[in-house]
Amino acid sequence: MANELETGLPSIRQIQTLIREDKEVEIKLLTNDLVTGKIRWQDTNCVCLVDHYDQQTVIWIQAIAYLKPKG
Amino acid sequence: MANELETGLPSIRQIQTLIREDKEVEIKLLTNDLVTGKIRWQDTNCVCLVDHYDQQTVIWIQAIAYLKPKG
Amino acid sequence: MANELETGLPSIRQIQTLIREDKEVEIKLLTNDLVTGKIRWQDTNCVCLVDHYDQQTVIWIQAIAYLKPKG
Amino acid sequence: MANELETGLPSIRQIQTLIREDKEVEIKLLTNDLVTGKIRWQDTNCVCLVDHYDQQTVIWIQAIAYLKPKG
Amino acid sequence: MANELETGLPSIRQIQTLIREDKEVEIKLLTNDLVTGKIRWQDTNCVCLVDHYDQQTVIWIQAIAYLKPKG
Amino acid sequence: MANELETGLPSIRQIQTLIREDKEVEIKLLTNDLVTGKIRWQDTNCVCLVDHYDQQTVIWIQAIAYLKPKG
């Protein structure tokens, strides 16, 4: 199905690892916003980022330029 | 069908929950506009936001960078 | 066929209603242009807007951020 | 075939008419460039614009915000 | 196959001609960069431009606004 | 499968060569960021760049304007 994550892809697997290891990441958006937090989940449309105050941000993957694991 | 919502996806379900709970959200667009309101409906192309004056804004999903539930 | 309008979708139906009721709309584009007028037709690629001087503008849907019915 | 023009669509037909009638158009791009000329041909990827000096510009449709027939 | 060039399309054929005739082109990108050179190859994702110092630039087609043959 | 790399494409092969030869590249993004490093892997969504401090950046291909191999 078109809406299942392709868990064989390195990019999908890397995000799964970041979720499992509860790692801080920094995501640069096409708007030039830089958002940071921990990834709670990913699906084929979005990733959900959670900040220090447990505030959620649902980011559309179409709007992502790059992602960096922190430190 | 390609035009039915994939209600199994976390991102689609989260928006359905926000509609049901009548929650205020803030949506950042690729134009850098920040729009706020309550989501009235979603389909595969758009979400419809309603503000305090009951004014509707139909937002194309292609133009969304991120969405934050408020408070 | 991929090129028929999905008239079951709320977003498509809302535009059909705006055409039928000859309503003024305001459309924000990804270029940050704000264009106003009445929608004459829509297809799967474009919407056609007509202003007070009957000047047509064919807008690509890919370039739309949001649409607001006026007043 | 995915690469044949859908000549049943109003947007495709309107461009065909503009080609046949040799009409001047103005095209706004997502880069905010405004280019003018006559459309020589269209295919599923591009339109070709020709200016007064017969200089060709091949424009990717993905980059078009809107098109206006002139005068 | 989705990844073969549709050599029947005018836009693809025009680029093939520019490659064969070793013509200088100018390409405007969605970043507003203007790059010039000769096209060495095209595929369904990219075109490869070569400048006077034989430096290659692989350009993603998704990022192209327009292309102009020079002189 | 839609998610296997089309290794017959020149653009995919060129990146494979850059990975194998451990070459420095410069990538221009649609955000106008210019990032440099060596490509560690590519898949159908992303390329992974590694800098001098072994810091990884996962870049979405959708956000790439161009790529240049360095000197």
Image: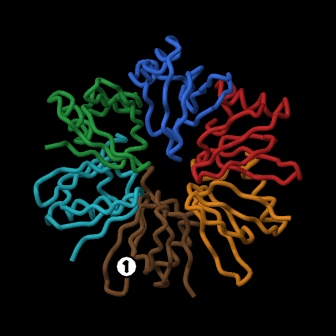
Chain colours: A orange, B brown, C cyan, D green, E blue, F red
Q: Quadrant of the C terminus of chain D?
A: top left
Find the residue positioned furthest to the right.
F53
Task: Tell me the chain of label 1.
Answer: B
Which residue is labeled 1 in the image? B50
Q: Is residue A28 left or right of residue E47?
A: right
Q: Secondary structure at mark 1?
A: strand
Q: Nearer the viewer, residue C36 or A53?
A: C36
Q: Nearer the viewer, residue B29 or F6?
A: B29
> Hey, which quadrant is residue C29 in on the image?
bottom left
Residue appearing at x 84%, y 66% in the figure = A21
Residue appearing at x 79%, y 69% in the figure = A24
Residue appearing at x 30%, y 34% in the figure = D6
The location of residue E12, given as percent across then percent down, is: 45, 23
Crowd around label 1: few <14 · some 14–19 · many ≥20 (10 Å): some
Find the residue positioned furthest to the top.
E21
The location of residue F58, given as percent across then percent down, is: 73, 51
Where C14 sits versus D32, above or below? Answer: below
Residue appearing at x 37%, y 64% in the figure = C66
Q: Quadrant of the N terminus of chain D?
A: top left
Q: How many marks?
A: 1
Q: Nearer the viewer, residue D38 or B19?
A: D38
Where F30 sits versus A67, above or below? Answer: above
Residue type, numbered disc 1: Val
The location of residue E54, given as percent across then percent down, is: 67, 22
The location of residue F71, given as percent across then percent down, is: 78, 31
